Amino acid sequence: MALGGLVSNRNFTCFIGPGSVYQLGKDLSPQRGGISCAFVARYGGQIAKDPFSRCWHGMCFHAKEPLNEKVSKPIPTFHDEVQHCSPLSQKSIHCMNMKLKASRRCQYFLSSDPYSSSLIQQRAVYGLGLNKLGKANTARVHYKSEEHDITEAKMDPLESTEGTGESILLEGNVPQVSSWWQQFPKRWVIVLLCFAAFLLCNMDRVNMSIAILPMSQEFNWNSATVGLIQSSFFWGYLLTQILGGIWADKIGGKLVLGFGVVWWSMATVLTPIAARIGLPCLLIMRAFMGIGEGVAMPAMNNMLSKWIPVSERSRSLALVYSGMYLGSVVGLAFSPLLIQKFGWPSVFYSFGSLGSIWFALWLRKAYSSPKDDPDLGVEEKRLILEGNVSNAPVSSIPWKLILSKAPVWALIISHFCHNWGTFILLTWMPTYYNQVLKFNLMESGLLCVLPWLTMAAFANIGGWIADTLVRKGLSITVVRKIMQSIGFLGPAFFLSQLSHVRTPAMAVLCMACSQGSDAFSQSGLYSNHQDIGPRYAGVLLGLSNTAGVLAGVFGTAATGFILQRGSWNDVFKVAVALYIIGTLVWNVFSTGEKVLD
């Protein structure tokens, strides 16, 4: 048996060619991408009709027992026998399924009729993938009979008898024609908006490290006061890590992340005013900024756990986190220029005002879940929901259950070990360049940008590698362990080589390679929260990131203490030891399977 089809660029009717005639059955499966009209076939003076509507991947056919009657003569055009059936007025949209129980050859055609404009709405033609020039894309039709299993049927085009109508061959489902921005996956719009939020997050965070120099001169701050101001950010940042995760899992990531960006943007804009009021006010404002940024990572993790299927999880998270690295680059690059031309307050005013632009886009384009988005296509929604487990909002957090799971503790401990080395490098790197490599402060500042760029590049490379391995059938557990092992052992190896290099260029190369391999952690532990507990992804990230922030605070202080009594080699040895501990814990206790329902 073969399936044939002819479509005109105008309204059309449906008819059946010579052969066995079948009684049609109904299958209630409303989906997208087909056509809608009333199907009427004539046999032996009787009319059998059955509406068929939108079918995903084209028209699917299902039939009951064949009738004994034969078509006595070829059937002409049946526009007078086709009844109008609105695709939206039906309470239930039907999809015709016809199972052919005869071995004879049968053909089905779609023909146009210029005088039957009421038979089908014009947009249904465009829904088949036709544009105004009468073009169409080809696709496949799959159907099955008891005697023959046919997976693909091709046809010869038929001549149109309507003069101006242009006939085209249609094989199965043809996607809708739409603009490129409408075809761009909605889930990646969410990813790009999260990327922009994290870009702003680190831009607003690092601008103080540059602006603090002219500010300390203007307000006569000593080094102890400067250290107090820098650390005040973490007071609020630690406070909202877990709370942000709880809020996101209960009320949705859209509201929580939007609140965070607006909150820290307002705190950034108000920083110059607070500084002129007095030191206590400035410390409170910096802590407020930490409160806003503290909810960002848990809320983002909650959003992506619902929007991104597991096969795209690593590279989506890598792209979002690379926004943080690039935000540091942008902040470090533009802050000196703004301060030089417009004064130090301009950094806070300009960076903080960008949050309002982001928030306007976020309100218009983002939804906490694909189920909440009315404009999300059926096919993309099916892809997301089939690639994810149920992510319904939670009413309560099962803390006892969460803290009883070994993979959760593997996340917490590994995050602590990871951030110890990362924060040491990012915090003390300018001092290392100046004291050990003898670079001046300007050269040291420029070289500080290099690790961020390296991390942004390698985070995305690692994400693509991880998702490729998952698509090829490698288990998620194995992929997470491989990527995080690189994220631990890579920095450990390159830091251990710093004591053996003899030139500043080689030392900088080792540092860049250390941070580049560290970025593979985005496809390891940073992706694992969504693996083991997608419904509690925000809470899990809040827990592990709290440990990571504490590692940064303690590690930064411990490094100063070690340098007073020892050397930089001792600092790197401690970091290497923690990297190795993290590798062992991760490979023994972590998993890529869901352990929390």
Image (spheres, rainbow, N blue to C red):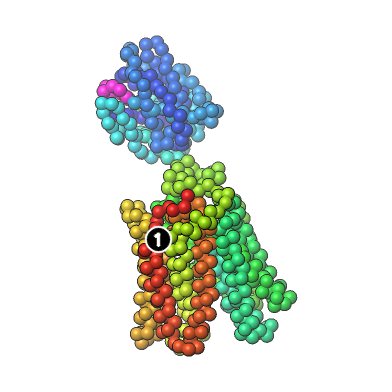
Residue at 47% x, 49% y: name it.
597
Above/below status of 226 relative to 412:
below
Whole-percent x, y for residue 185 in the image: 47, 49
On whether residue 261 falls in the magenta region, the answer is no
Q: Position of residue 236 (x, y in %)?
A: 62, 68
**Closest to the observer, 197 or 135:** 197
Residue 162: name its quadrant: top left
Name the residue located 36 percent from the left edge and 59 percent from the top edge.
479
Q: Residue at x 53, y 47 (%)?
A: 392
Q: Measuring from the top left, give residue 25's x and y in whole percent.
A: 41, 23
- The kind of residue on which mark 1 rests is Ser
Magenta stretch, main secondary structure class: loop
Residue at figure coordinates x 43%, y 52% from the top left: 594
Nearer to us in this view, 142 or 146: 146
Name the residue tied to disc 1: 590
Where are the magenta residues, as a range? 100-106
